[in-house]
């Protein structure tokens, strides 16, 4: 005898039991979320489904990774917020478009299906912790809605089994809470020493700046960076081609003026006109002699020599060789390697009250484990723009012990006066709030 063929009800019931079985077999919330938004399509025929937990979309039909900023994700979360506003988030129902705002209705027409059903997920206390947004082209029948509500209980039970809610709540007595709050308040009043970090560099102390003595082109550097030099050593040589030509022309012009003066002096005894021109010619000779002397001085300046012994402090000779420079432009610095100070660039946003003699600790980038002690000597009143493009105050500090090598960079920690711990922690936020609010 042949078995009877199953009818529609039997097939629907079999599919429904299969959905419940898939939910209970899920080994993680990710597997369960995938089953919740995909496995029900065969039974309920929805176009797409979205799983929301705590108001955020966790899974979508046919999507492996949910993009938080996607238009459809934003639409579903906004629609759930509208249901919460109308108090309909805790009940399973067909979504009424009147409950949604105008923008959400427009998004539903373009991004979703005409008919949607909201299926809440609740815990054992009846509190809604999430839900399913189901959308398709035709309304959900009463029988389908009943099956969905039953399925929601299974999904909620499976979700809570995989990820039970463990809210952290303070259950201490009120007196104990007040005692803890008082202890924290006293802790915030503990005075601590203010400190701030700023970039710093070891620079020469009392060094002699070597500047360009004339307008010209640098022919060559005769020293290398950090090379020891003695007083009188040749440092830089300028291109003297035009200066030599000017000196030769001035010399010849002076010779012509002297010859003309001598000739007129000899004719002055017999020629009254020659006698009258003697003063003019003598003044011209003095003028030409001054021009010759100036040309010689310029020629002598084409070779720059060290005025004192020390080391030549500059970055790169190739950067200036062959480059035209102007009078007074800085070329290098001659410094004593044993005499150095610390130059600090303190950003305006990090500035604290610092007194002369304040403690400074330097940690070099090349040797971050060792600390070099220094004392603050000078603080600039006005902030200047640094090479990085930010405003900073220039601070100078003197090393307590032997200074590091000139040119080394690092981070300086400056110590100010003592202040309450609350002020130390909230100084930057308070300053930002005052700048934003204008208080």
Image: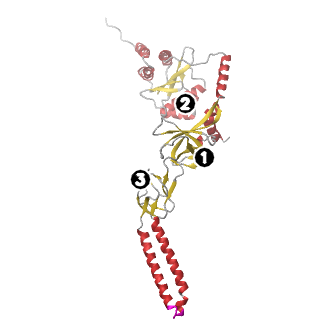
Secondary structure of residue under mark 1: strand
Q: Nearer the viewer, residue 103 or 257?
A: 257
Q: Position of residue 214 (x, y in %)?
A: 48, 64
**Image disc number at residue 224:** 3
Q: CA distance from mark 1 to mark 3?
A: 31 Å
Q: Nearer the viewer, residue 35 or 355?
A: 355
Q: CA distance from mark 2 to mark 3?
A: 69 Å
Whether residues under marks 2 and 1 lie with C-beta atoms below 8 angstroms apart, the answer is no
- Name the residue carrying label 2: 78
Q: Position of residue 43 (x, y in %)?
A: 42, 19
Is 136 included in the stretch rendered in magenta? no
Q: Residue furthest top?
A: 1
- Name the residue carrying label 1: 378
Predominant SS of the magenta segment: loop
Q: CA distance from mark 2 to mark 1?
A: 59 Å
Secondary structure of residue under mark 3: loop
Mark count: 3
């Amino acid at each position: 005898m042949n078995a009877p063929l199953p009818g529609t009800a039997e097939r629907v019931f079999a599919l429904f039991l299969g959905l419940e079985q898939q939910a209970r077999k899920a080994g993680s919330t990710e597997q369960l979320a995938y089953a919740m938004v995909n496995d029900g399509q065969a039974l309920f025929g929805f176009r797409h489904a979205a799983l929301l937990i705590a108001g955020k979309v966790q899974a979508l039909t046919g999507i492996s990774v949910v993009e938080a900023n996607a238009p459809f994700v934003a639409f579903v979360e906004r629609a759930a917020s509208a249901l919460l506003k109308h108090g309909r988030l805790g009940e399973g129902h067909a979504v009424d478009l009147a409950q949604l705002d105008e923008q959400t209705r427009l998004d539903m027409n373009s991004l979703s299906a005409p008919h949607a059903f909201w299926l809440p997920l609740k815990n054992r206390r009846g509190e809604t912790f999430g839900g399913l947004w189901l959308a398709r082209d035709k309304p959900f029948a009463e029988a389908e809605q009943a099956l969905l509500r039953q399925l929601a209980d299974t999904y909620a039970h499976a979700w809570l089994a995989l990820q039970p809610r463990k809210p952290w709540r303070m259950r201490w007595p009120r007196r104990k809470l007040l005692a803890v709050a008082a202890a924290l308040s006293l802790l915030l009043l503990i005075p601590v020493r203010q400190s701030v970090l700023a970039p710093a560099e070891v620079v020469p102390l009392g060094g002699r700046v070597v500047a360009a003595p004339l307008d010209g082109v640098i022919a060559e550097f005769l020293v290398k960076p950090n090379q020891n030099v003695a007083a009188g050593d040749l440092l830089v040589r300028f291109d003297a081609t035009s200066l030599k030509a000017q000196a030769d022309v001035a010399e010849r012009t002076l010779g012509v003026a002297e010859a003309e003066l001598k000739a007129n002096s000899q004719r002055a005894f017999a020629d009254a006109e020659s006698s009258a021109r003697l003063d003019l010619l003598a003044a011209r000779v003095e003028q030409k002699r001054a021009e010759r002397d100036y040309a010689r001085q310029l020629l002598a300046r084409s070779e720059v020599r060290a005025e004192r012994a020390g080391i030549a402090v500059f970055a790169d000779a190739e950067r200036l060789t062959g480059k035209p420079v102007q009078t007074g432009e800085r070329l290098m610095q001659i410094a004593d390697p044993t005499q150095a100070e610390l130059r600090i660039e303190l950003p305006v946003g990090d500035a604290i009250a610092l007194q002369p003699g304040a403690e400074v600790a330097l940690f070099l980038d090349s040797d971050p484990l060792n600390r070099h002690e220094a004392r603050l000597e000078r603080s600039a009143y006005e902030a200047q723009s640094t090479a990085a493009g930010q405003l900073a105050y220039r601070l100078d500090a003197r090393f307590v012990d032997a200074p590091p090598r000139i040119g080394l960079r690092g981070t300086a920690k400056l110590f100010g006066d003592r202040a309450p711990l609350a002020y130390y922690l909230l100084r930057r936020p308070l300053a930002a709030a005052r700048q934003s609010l204008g208080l």
